Image (cartoon, rainbow, N blue to C red):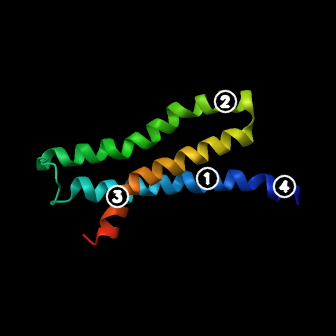
Amino acid sequence: MKLRRSIIPVLLTYFIDHFGFAIVFLLFGPLVLGQDLSIPISQPERPILALFAILIFPLAQSLGAPIFGALSDRIGRKKTFLISISGTIVGNAIMDLPFIGEDLLGS
């Protein structure tokens, strides 16, 4: 029973992490590659911008992993998971704000 309770934060972190990665694919691709952009971007530049938008997430994970590893050694794994989950939730919410506003305003 103790094993199940200790794996819940790991699975929750894994789920939220991959949910954030899915948001990158689902939202940034159509935003960058779509024809109705509010910021004019030429057609040849759109795939490059989409590539950078998608690559930022794994790059940040690669750079953040040693930082969170050292932090977990210092303050503990559970607290580090809570910090990581909280930061991811806040980041996902900030990314979703423009879309939530559109839905609420009916645009």
The numbered mark, 2 or 1, whose residue comes first in the sequence reads 1
Q: CA distance from mark 1 to mark 3?
A: 20 Å
Q: Earlier in the sequence, mark 4 or mark 2?
A: 4
Residue drawn where x is 17% and y is 44% of the image: 45
Secondary structure at badge 2 equals: helix
User: Disc 2 to disc 1, how far (Cα)?
Assistant: 18 Å
**Location of mark 2 (residue):** 71
The picture places residue 44, in percent across and down from the top left corner, at: 14, 46
Marking on residue 61? none
Return the mark for residue 14: 1
Q: Nearer the viewer, residue 32 or 101?
A: 101
- Crowdedness of circle 3 by 10 Å Cα count: few (<14), some, many (20+)? few
Cβ atoms at labels 2 and 3 below 8 Å apart: no
Q: Nearer the viewer, residue 38 or 105?
A: 105
Q: Which residue is mark 4?
A: 3
Q: Residue at x 60, y 42 (%)?
A: 84
Kindly identify the amino acid type of the residue bearing the numbered disc 4: Leu
In this orientation, which residue lies closer to the viewer: 70 or 58?
70
Residue that protrudes farthest toward the bottom in the picture: 106
Residue placed at 31% from the left, 41% from the top? 52
Q: Earlier in the sequence, mark 1 or mark 4?
A: 4
User: Which mark's residue is nearer the viewer, 2 or 1?
Assistant: 2
Decide which of tag 1 and tag 3 comes sooner along the chain.
1
| Residue at the spot 48% in from the left edge and 53% down from the top edge | 20
Q: Position of residue 103 (x, y in %)?
A: 33, 69
Q: Residues within 10 Å of mark 1 (few under 14, many from 20)?
A: few
